[in-house]
Amino acid sequence: MQHPRATGVIFRKNSTMLTAPGSIWHEAVSMYQSVYPKGLKVRHRALEIIFPNGAMLKFSHMQHDSDMFSHKGAQYSFCAFDEVTDFSQDAVMYLLSRMRNAHVDYTPQMFLTTNPDYEHWTRVFIQDYYLDPLTGIPLPEKAGHKRYFFRQGNTILWYNSKEAAEAVHGKGDENGVNTFTFWPATCRDNPPLLKAQPDYISRLMGLPRVEMERLLLGSWFARPEAASMFKRSWCELVEHPNGRAIKRVRAYDLAMTLPSEQNPNPDWTRGVLISKDRTGLYTVEDLVSIRDRAHHVEKLIFETALKDGPNTIICIPQDPNAAAAAYARDLQRKLGEMGFTCRLLRPVKSKIIRFSPFSSVAQAGFVHIVEGDWNKEFFDELESFDGGRAKKDDIVDATSDSFYALNRGVALPDFSLPELGSSLKFDFSYN
């Protein structure tokens, strides 16, 4: 409001959130009218406030991702998303490209406000630096630290100093590096609110556990326990694979798609290696991952098979689709010719039913996890799995298939004993 040609925009998810009684639009109009008794123009139909010096603040919604293109060609020196967990990363990043205004003497800035939400992409932006790794509560000593990021395709590269970013992407204003700062806050940082409502903290303390941890403590890891079929606390981390294992299986969940602008987050090819010993102890020993075309996926499978050795059984999913089934059989042939045992598995049950046996054994304390840089990705997906289609489940499926194959009986063929004078049918199985 102090810069004559400043242009700003504040987003909420839909128009109802913008204009409902007591909403951000009505609060803003009331606040600015008290600051400027004269000369302030309020355009209720367009949801725009024009300040006496000509600066403009617009209020807009973005109910669908496609709505972001209505801001094509816009120039904003200020942009804010009120409750950013209602918006996608693509929408926010697109508006970041609209942050340009040659008529102000400050660097255009974007602000994102939100309550903690474990499932939202904003958690990924802050969890490795600003949050306590166990509780998800912001670390006070990291508050306000400036970080640097560069968006490379659909990947965000992070740096803790300007020098580190410039060493990779060069110096100057055109190197594509942006800055990011995280400021945590709770109701304790709002003295006027607590003065007006002294019992507010007590009311937050009386909320269910998840909401209390989110809204009072500011935890980004708080989520309902019932939403998960797996907890990392059920498993013991170990340094090495189980030397007493009698059987090892690496099962794959296959995908053959590269990330692209149209599909920035395709499924992964995942390969989970699990072993079992005579006491019934299972050890998840390794996870390999790739998102690429078929020949790169095959290369990963062959190289991993050589590393695992011929005593490890390889399981490949056999899709009902004819072409996919033919590909699985061809992959089985290639692995067999290389000297490896490969089995085809046809998933016939729901994902929850398939994963439940592993979940039960883990809860009983019979699953160990070998420490590795893949642990966090493994735990995060298994803990967030609820059987729905909205979340990735490639690791879940590979884990389910490995566990199933470890406990699958192999039937020997029927045969007869002619010297006994009659045909006897036998059915043997072994684990």
Image (cartoon, helix red, strand yellow):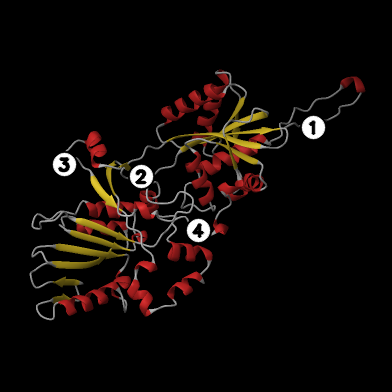
Dot 4 or dot 1: first in sequence order is 4
Q: Mark 4 falls on what kind of element?
A: loop
The residue at the point 45 percent across, 30 percent down is 297
Q: Amino acid at mark 4?
A: Arg
Vertical side of 209 occupied by 276: above or below: above
Q: Amino acid at mark 1?
A: Asp
Residue 75 in percent (x, y) is at: 15, 57
Q: Amino acid at mark 3?
A: Glu
- The answer to the question of whether label 3 and label 4 lie on touching residues, with beta carbons closer than 8 A, is no
Dot 3 or dot 4: first in sequence order is 3
**Mark seen at residue 427:** 1
Q: Closer to the camera: disc 2 or disc 4? A: 4
What's the CA distance linking mark 2 and mark 1?
49 Å
How many residues crowd around disc 3 within 10 Å: few (fewer than 14), some, or many (20 or more)? few
**Mark seen at residue 223:** 4
Observer able to see residue 342: no
**Mark seen at residue 174:** 3
Q: Circle 2 sits on which residue?
A: 263
Work out whether residue 251 or residue 159 is closer to the camera in this orientation and state it: 159
What's the CA distance linking mark 4 and mark 1?
48 Å
Quadrant showing the C terminus: top right
Vertical side of 42 occupied by 401: above or below: above
How many residues crowd around disc 2 within 10 Å: few (fewer than 14), some, or many (20 or more)? few
Dot 2 or dot 1: first in sequence order is 2
